[in-house]
Each structure stands twice: as structure tokens, then as C-alpha cells.
Amino acid sequence: MKANYINGRFVAGSAGRPNINPSNTDDVIGLYAQADEAETRDAIAAATEAFPAWACGSLQARADMLDRIGSEILARKDELGLLLSREEGKTLPEGIGEAARAGQIFKFFAGEVLRLRGDHLGSVRPGIEVDVTREPAGVVGIITPWNFPIAIPAWKIAPALAYGNTVVFKPAELVPGSAWALAEIISRAGLPAGVFNLVMGPGRAVGQTLIDDQRVRAITFTGSGVTGRRVLLGSMERLAKVQLEMGGKNPLVVLDDADLEVAVTAAVQGAFYSTGQRCTASSRFIVQKGIYPRFVDAVATRLAALRVGDALRPDTDIGPVVDAGQLAQDLDYIAKGRAEGARLLCGGDELRRDTPGFYLSPAFFVDAHNDMAIAREEIFGPVACAIPVASYEEALAMANDTEFGLSAGICTTSLKHATHFKRHVQAGMVMVNVATAGVDYHVPFGGRKGSSLGSREQGSYAAEFFTTVKTAYTAA
């Protein structure tokens, strides 16, 4: 059984949970320990004790450790990507790409250790100087989702460590393998005991303990809006710092002047790759009427050519849905779309393959409207809808008519409309003539409205959450 990592050693829990391959439910990847409240408190205690020395330790040593972690991840990206695809279900090229991204993130933040800046200012009072510096927040609780089981942990753990915090990391229950592999790499990088801790287990035990414990000074969470609100309320009660990423219902606007091939590629890649299980997926295509018939026909043709199958097969374009519960949710939304009057142009069928798994053909609805559940609620599966509009102005208004605001895209050859859209769409990230899903690790990630709360993730902007500002006055 793969054990939790607490205070510099692997500690087997009293219970284990099997890790099941969604491409082949007969394949049990391994048994992973489940932490309880007491073990989580042990991890918090270890992180609390380790914090002072780590926060004030050698910056060069810290940078070197993060760089070693990144180098090993990159050297093992094929192996780690295989494990990731086996447990989460995204295709093998996607899994390997995600593993490589995790390595690049650690290497980026190895450099950020030495790039954290402050300010030296004169005071308005003669004879006094002012220093503005950033210091680590303290013990950071990290709660991550199942859809990016190594990249999202990396983009939270790496900056937390880089800026001098200690970490207690709780991965999603569905994907313990990638989390454990990452922890095992970190365990050999030279970090002092207690600086990094892995506690696998259910949210009601591990997650809730992180939320409730006063010693955890900051919590960064990515997951559902329902759970995110619970994290927020619990953390606010004790005035802990909180960062939330909670999903989206992302629009892709396609104007009459768009390059059809560019628009179709952006739509299919953004909505259906990674089985649509991305918070940045474009599940609403808002399409001007002049190009609408050609666009929907071209999308349907492209989808018909995609192969849904085992994530590890080289000819697979789209892997399985992550588990039975997510598959049931996807099928329920497909039924809702039909009941509400949208036309299912293609897909939406549960599929059978050589191995038992959670296979679903990409579902594409047309002639939808923005009040339908499939157009308003995050489905988190390979389901998208096309909504016809008369003008750019109507498209922009519809794009903004949502409780979410993570990512938004537009396909157009008009500089005027692209520029206006970038300025006026209510989203944290905007894509022009590219898919809404797919971001770089060295620039900010995050949204607005119901998608995100708190400062941005990734890039140098990560310092805002993982550090706190101190202003010091000195008489000359």
C-alpha cells in the first residue's frame, strides 16, 4: 500500500483505497493509504514546526531543491504521464504533456526563489527610510482536483515552497497515484522533514481538518463551486487566507468573418479534448448566424472522425470519463438538453470498448439558447452546445450572461472586434483565435465572478497569495 508522507517519512494509514483505471475498470493501479483527522493534524504539526527554519533558510538551497524536483519530473515524464493517463483517463500524449508541464513549473519557481523583490523607499518624514518586503504566509493547505492530477498540485506546491511556506497537500481521492509519485520525488530532493507533507484521504476528514485548524494560515483550493464555498466559509471563520478556483461555463464566440478552420479547431480542442474535463473548456459556442450552418456541420464532421477509447492506445483521440459518477452526470445533462428542446446533432452515447470503462461519445447540441441548463451549468464532460446570435453585440452580452468568468474566446479576423472583446468580456483569461483551454505556466491563471476568489495562480503573480507584505520603518 502506498503510504502518506508525514514529517519526512512515509506513514501507512489504517485503511487503503484502490485506484481504478477508468479505461479498464478491471485494472487496479494500486492501493493508497487513507489519512484520518489525527494523521492530518500530525502533518500540520510537522509543517508548523518546520516553518521557521525553512522560511529563513538559504535561498540558494531552496532554489536547488526545486530545480532537482523539476529535473526529475522532466526526466521521468513518460513514466509519470503513463501513470497519469492510466488513473485519470486523458490520452497518453496529454498525460505526458501534463507531466512535463509539472516539471517546468518547478523549474520556473526555482528561479522565482531568487527573483522575489521588495521596495526601499524614502519616508515623507525626514530621516526615516522604508522597506517593503514579502514574507511567507506560513503553513499552507493545498487541496487539488482530479482532472489535472500532477500539473495543478505542481502549480500550488512549487510556489508555496519557493516563497518559504511549508505544505500539507491533499489530492483528490480519484487520482492518488500521480500525487504519491510527486511526493516521492519531493521526498528525495533534500527538503527538511515537515516542510512538505502528503495526506491522502476523504474531504470530510483531511480537507475539513485543514480548513478548521488554526495553524494552517492559508488554503488554496481548486474544485467544485459547492466545495469551494464550504472552504471559504470555514476559512473565513478563523480569518485564514483563501484562494479558490471553482470552474467555468466558458463561451467561444464565432463571428461571421472568422476563419472556419481556425474556429472549428478551437471549438473541438477547447470543448472535447481531455474528455471536456477542464474548467477552461468552451462548452458554449456562441455563433453568428451567417457562419452558423457551416460551423455546426464542420464541428459535427470533425467530431465524427475522433476515436473514443482506451487512454493508452495510440489511436485514441478522447479517453474515458473519469468515473461512473461523472459519466452519470454527463448523461443526465444530455437528457436535460434534449428535454429542454436543444437538438443533439451528434454523440451523447455511452460506448462499449474492448475493456470495461466509462466511455462517452462527444455530445454536440445545436439550436440551444442561453437559458438552458446545458448552457448555464458546468457539466465537466464532453458536452457542448451551439447558440445562434445575430450580431457581435448580442454575442458579447450572451458571453457575459453567466455566473462564471474564467476563460472566454473569440474567433474573428476583425481587429476591432477582437480588441473590444478582450476589453469587455467578463473573464479572467481571454483567447483570440485559439481554444479557451490551454494556458502557459509563467503567466497568471484565474477568473472572476463565480469562477475564482483571491489572487491569481501561476507565474510571478503567485507571490501575492503565498506571501504577505511587511512594511518596516527605520530612523537613519
Image (tube, rainbow, N blue to C red):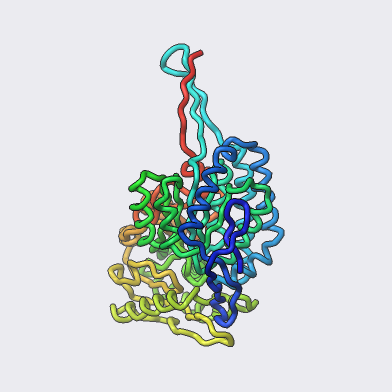
Q: Please name whichever residue, 56 or 412, is drawn nearer the observer in this view of the structure.
A: 56
| Residue farthest right in this picture | 75
Above or below, comparing residue 282 to residue 446 in the picture: below
User: The N terminus is located in which quarter?
Assistant: bottom right
Task: Report the side of 371 relative to 316 (left or right).
Answer: left
The mark total stands at 0
Is 354 drawn above or below residue 264 in the view shown? below
What residue do we see at 32% from left, 60% from top? 402
Residue ID at (34%, 53%): 449
Residue at left offset 48%, top offset 75% = 323
Residue 43 appearing in the image: yes
Q: Is residue 156 above or below residue 54?
A: below
Q: Nearer the viewer, residue 71 or 298?
A: 71
Whether residue 421 is visible to the viewer of this picture, yes or no, is no
Q: Position of residue 266 (x, y in %)?
A: 50, 66
In the rendered structure, the answer to whether residue 12 lies left or right of residue 419 reads right
Decide which of 272, 1 is in the foreground and name it: 1
Q: Position of residue 340 (x, y in %)?
A: 28, 78
Image coordinates of residue 106 in percent, x first then y, are: 62, 50
Q: Quadrant of residue 355?
A: bottom right
Q: Residue at x 51, y 31 (%)?
A: 133
Image spot of residue 10 (x, y percent):
62, 59
